[in-house]
Amino acid sequence: MKARSISHPERLVDVAAMQAAFSESFAASGSDLVKLRPTLVGILKEYLNTGRTEAERRLLSDGKGTQCAKHLSYIQDEIIHTLYEFLHGKIHAGVAQELAIIATGGYGRGTLAPGSDIDLLFLLRGKQDERTGRIIEFILYTLWDLRLKVGHATRSTEECIRLAKTDNTILTSILEARLICGNKALSDQMQQAFRRDIVQAG
């Protein structure tokens, strides 16, 4: 299915159409993930290119560089969110809710320059189990197949806090953390622990 043209003036990608294309491909593949991922990559590539083209058009029209960076971040959010919701609803129902996918670094600030790294934190309740690991792996391999530069970490809240106390890079990345999708309560708990044990303690 080809990416549809953008109709809503405030939307850069047609998320509903992207989700429908995912569901259509899932039905056709018989839920075989090995066969399904290349198809999903093709769909996402269409929407990624469509969104980037629209962001560029708006930049050339209004000259607003910061707004363009926000548009590029929004497009990436929708790509990841759609992929997560698909896995949660179709493949690993309930398991995906055990993690939160969080943007960090410049991406966490909600801005992306063209070609910038996509920095992600996969936040878990505790240790990673096999099923959650498969979800994270599927998401990462799909993003890599899109030729995106992805920096990533998989940690629990306790690991985030412990490492932030000794590593300024990790500390800064959590300062700029922003939930993309997944378990909001888990993300909120991490942010609260960070404020209590790092920010206020310092």
Image (cartoon, rainbow, N blue to C red):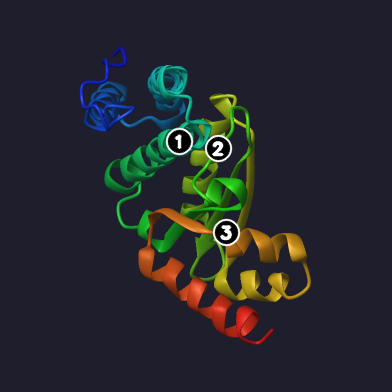
Label 3 sits on residue: 176
Q: Secondary structure at mark 1?
A: helix
Dot 3 amino acid type:
Glu
Label 1 sits on residue: 67
As rendered, which of 40 and 161 lies closer to the eye? 161
Task: Using the image, determine if residue 200 lies above or below residue 4.
Answer: below
Describe residue 48's horizontal placement relative to residue 30 as left or right. right
**Disc 2 to disc 1, how far (Cα)?**
10 Å
In the picture, the disc for residue 112 is 2
Q: Secondary structure at mark 2?
A: loop
Give the residue at x 69% y 76%. 162
Tell which circle, 3 or 2, labels the residue nearer the N-terminal end: 2
Dot 2 amino acid type:
Leu
Callout 3 crowding tier (Cα within 10 Å): few <14, some 14–19, many ≥20 = some
Tell which circle, 2 or 1, labels the residue nearer the N-terminal end: 1
Q: Position of residue 135 (x, y in %)?
A: 46, 47
Tell which circle, 3 or 1, labels the residue nearer the N-terminal end: 1
Residue reaching furthest front?
62
Q: Secondary structure at mark 3?
A: loop
Q: Quadrant of residue 35?
A: top left
